[in-house]
Image (cartoon, grey):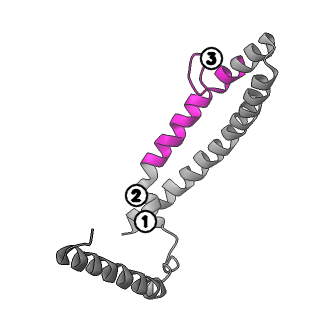
Amino acid sequence: MLPNRKSAAALGALALAGAALLAAAPAQAATTTAKAAPKGDGAKAICKRLPKTEARIDASITRLNGAVTVPGSVARLAQRVTDAKAAGHTEVYTYLNDRLTFRKSLLPTLQQRQADLKSVATWCTAQADAK
């Protein structure tokens, strides 16, 4: 069955539009430029987000230092490691023990960030007072 004239015209228009898009794609890619390098250190944005950042870090430290009943705490994961070892689940024990090692390393990092943010907060306050 041969296509009618309307179908042939629509098919031709579709093929022409597709060819035009393919021809334009390299030209558009060439005109796209990389983003410019930052013009500052982002201090204004850091000061603006400071309360939320402090709250997130405080919550993380509280959770990590939590009791065995607190999901995400070091104590809870340590208990799971102990349970896996007692059950003889060697692969699970290894996996959980590696997670425990990483989670324990998070605590000093977060505490350092907390201390750094205190000095940043002091700096932000001084900048706001200077204005």
Specify the quadrant of the image occupied by residue 23.
bottom left
Is 116 left or right of 123, judged from the image as shown? Answer: right
Residues packed near mark 1 inside 10 Å, few (<14), some (14 to 19) or many (20 plus) = few
Q: Which label was assigned to residue 44?
A: 1
Highlighted range, magenta: 52-79
Question: Which of pointers 1 and 3 lies earlier in the amino acid sequence?
Answer: 1
- Indicate the quadrant where residue 92 lies: top right
Circle 2/circle 1 CB separation < 8 Å: yes
Q: Residues within 10 Å of mark 3 (few under 14, many from 20)?
A: some
Q: Residue furthest toward the top?
A: 87
Of the residues shown, which amino acid type is indicated by label 3? Val
Judge whether residue 115 is colored magenta: no
- Identified by mark 1, the residue type is Lys
State the mark number for residue 48.
Answer: 2
Query: Going by the image, does 93 lie left or right of 20?
Result: right
Residue that numbered label 3 is attached to: 68
**Number of numbered discs visible in the structure rendering:** 3
Q: Amino acid at mark 2?
A: Lys
Q: Is residue 112 left or right of residue 89?
A: left
Is 53 rendered above or below residue 45? above
State the SS at label 1: helix
The image shows residue 119, relative to residue 64, as above or below, that is: below
Would you say residue 77 sits in the magenta stretch? yes
Distance between the Cα atoms at labels 1 and 3? Answer: 40 Å
